[in-house]
Amino acid sequence: VKPGKYKLGQKMSNKDLITLLRSGKQTPVNVIFNNIRTKEQLAQRVSEQIEASQQSILNLLNDFDYTKKLGFTSDNILSMFLPNTYEFYWNTSADKFIQRMKKEHSKFWTADRLLKAKKIDLSPVQVSVIASIVQMESNKEDEKPTIAGVYINRYKKDWKLEADPTLVYALGDFTVNRVLSVYKEIESPYNTYKYKGLPPGPICTPGIQTIEAVLESPKTDYIFFVAKPDFSGYSNFASTYPEHLVYAKAYQRALD
């Protein structure tokens, strides 16, 4: 008998059943993951859908040499995983799962996308890190390219990104809805209020649409943005600090 997931028919005879189990003709399973924040979450979600255990997946994701061979670090390995639905056999090992994800990542990064990344002077990993921040910053697909442009402008100016979602990630409490000033003192390489540059890795697994938003980000002078006071979920963008202050005060008044 070969291990796996098999679909049994109501009218199967004992002989049919034994033949099926000996043949190894499994029924594929759909492995789905999205809204992933950490390696632990990814390992758990995947282990619920295939035979590989959570710990076996996590061990490989945390293995310095293993991730290096894939072209990543254990900090940024999450950028290799693109949220989607994938077909696997149930008895897939942790290594085979991760190797397949590497192939999917390579397939996604076509010559055209690599060229777009090069034009904005970012590597695929850097694109993914910025996309992860944008993903947690807004759920408005039409505004994501502009938000991405703001963070790219700050990064290119060697400013601190000062991205609130990175504070939530550094805090480790993903139920937080409102970022407080005290969070800005958290000691973490993910605290973009303390440290310049991009965080060591993505703060979630950004969706394909958000990655595209970074690649398609328009060239603007915007370096600030704040939520609109109408609570529509959209933002007011500004190129200067005085202009930004006007928008920020309007939003603060609306909150109060």
Image (tube, rainbow, N blue to C red):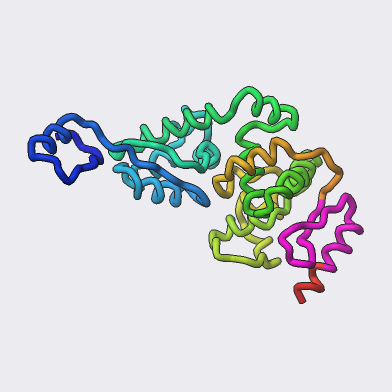
Residue placed most toward the observer, 58 or 230: 230
For the point 72% across and 37% down, the residue is 216
The quarter of the rendered structure image containing the C terminus is bottom right
Rendered view: 36 above or below 28: below
Return the x and y of residue 82 as percentages of the image width and height.
Answer: 52, 39
In the image, is residue 245 part of the stretch drawn in magenta?
yes
- Total tally of numbered discs in the picture: 0
Rendered view: 11 above or below 164: above
Asked which quadrant contains residue 131, the reply is top right
Residue placed most toward the observer, 235 or 238: 235
Residue placed most toward the observer, 33 or 67: 33
Return the x and y of residue 117 as percentages of the image width and height.
Answer: 69, 30
Rendered view: 188 above or below 69: below
Magenta stretch: give its range.
Answer: 224-250
For the point 90% across and 52% down, the residue is 240
Return the x and y of residue 248 as percentages of the image width and height.
Answer: 82, 64
Q: Is residue 141 left or right of residue 1?
A: right
Q: Is residue 169 left or right of residue 41?
A: right
In the image, is residue 7 part of the stretch drawn in magenta?
no
For the point 45% across and 51% down, the residue is 41
For the point 81% across and 73% down, the residue is 253
Return the x and y of residue 212 as percentages of the image width and height.
Answer: 66, 38
Q: Residue furthest left?
A: 14
The quarter of the rendered structure image containing the N terminus is top left
Q: Residue furthest top?
A: 111
Asked which quadrant contains residue 157, the reply is top right
Residue placed most toward the observer, 212 or 57: 212
